Amino acid sequence: MQKHPSSLIDLKSLTRHQILSLFSRAQELKTQPGGLDYRGQTAALIFFEPSTRTRFSFETALARCGFHPLVLDLPEGTSLEKGETEEDTVLNLAAMDPRLIIVRSSDAFPLSKVVSQVSCPVINAGWGTQGHPTQALLDGYTLFQEFNELQSLKILFVGDIKHSRVVASHFELLDKMGAEVGQCGPSQFMVDRPGTHLFRRLEEGLEWCDAVMALRFQFERHGQGLEFSKEDYRLSYGLTRSALRHLRPGGVMMHPGPVNYGIEIDAEVLTDSRNRILKQVHHGVFIREALIRTLLEGRL
Ligand code: CP
């Protein structure tokens, strides 16, 4: 078998033009259904790690294209329970000739190797800390809808930038689109990246940016190895009503989800008119549908 040329593992190979075309196609699909062109065909959705938004928005996007999804999202009832590896699991599902494989996995999963072993396109639906390209695309589309342009837009990421696969993909996307990136959070979570603005105080970052994206505080990853408590974190870096006074009235507040309320965002600010968190989720369906269609047409 040969590597399919249209797999989407990261955003490095996409051009600015291709990204803008995806935004435009998502916009069309949002207003007008694209048709059940793939009726009678299968697509494999393989989630070795938990997911709500990505899994169900891909499933919705596949349904809008007419696909029958083959979903594996729990080890129970599969041969993973008998010791079959994740790699073998994907190769066996690929042998059933789906048109597309969508996979979420840990860093340990050999995604690049698997992509080279299957004959259909593979989409990365979140790969450990390495990338989450469709999240960055849907966030980019959300920003594009708000501001009509990403060039020179100032985006502030707040939180664990070092371990965020969302930010890893945003660095690829936003550089290409000419946006400016800021980071704010505990020093152990910051990255050394030329051209990125570093803000020690959240208020300064919020005054600088057009859009703020809070990141999930990843308890499961850090365990006891943190230099601060959750309450310290909230007081310094949480999007509270008081902190959001520093975000300009036309700015927007985002979060890729899932949200830990009372830590990175206070529940009471969800009613803030600048909140776009559920709008991001809504857009996830259309950007993923646009991606699936464009990729299967061989235009990516
Ligand atoms: N944003 C995101 O990837 O959410 P899920 O983990 O719920 O898919």
Image (cartoon, helix red, strand yellow):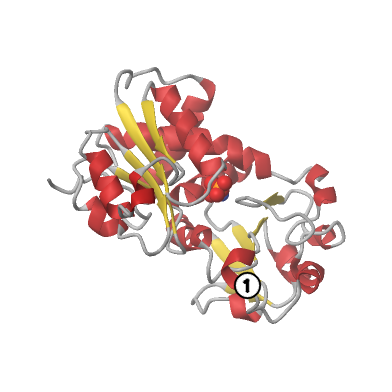
Q: Amino acid at mark 1?
A: Gly
Q: Quadrant of residue 230?
A: bottom right
Q: Residue furthest left?
A: 1
Q: Look at 65% across and 52% down and name the residue there.
A: 255
Q: Quadrant of residue 144?
A: top right
Q: Look at 22% across and 33% down and name the residue there.
A: 97
- Please tell me which residue lies in front, 61 or 87: 87
Q: Quadrant of the C terminus?
A: top left
Task: Using the rendered image of the protein, determine whether residue 168 is visible from the camera's viewpoint.
Answer: yes
Residue 63, how many percent across, how many down? Answer: 44, 24
Q: Is residue 159 left or right of residue 49?
A: right
Q: Look at 37% across and 24% down and name the residue there.
A: 68
- Please tell me which residue lies in front, 77 or 65: 77
Task: Using the rendered image of the protein, determine whether residue 148 is visible from the camera's viewpoint.
Answer: no
Residue 251, how many percent across, how many down? Answer: 72, 51
Q: Residues within 10 Å of mark 1 (few under 14, many from 20)?
A: few
What residue is disc 1 on? 223
Q: Residue furthest right?
A: 242
Residue 142, how many percent across, how many down? Answer: 58, 43
Label 1: which secondary element: loop
Q: Quadrant of the N terminus?
A: top left
Please tell me whether residue 111 is drawn above or below residue 229 in the rendered image.
above
- Please tell me which residue lies in front, 201 or 94: 94
Q: Quadrant of residue 296?
A: top left
Q: Is residue 212 left or right of residue 82?
A: right
- Please tell me which residue lies in front, 29 or 239: 239
Please tell me whether residue 86 is drawn above or below residue 192 in the rendered image.
above
Q: Residue furthest front?
A: 82
Q: Look at 55% across and 72% down and name the residue there.
A: 196
Residue 149, how many percent across, how many down? Answer: 54, 47
Please tell me whether residue 201 is drawn above or below residue 249 in the rendered image.
below
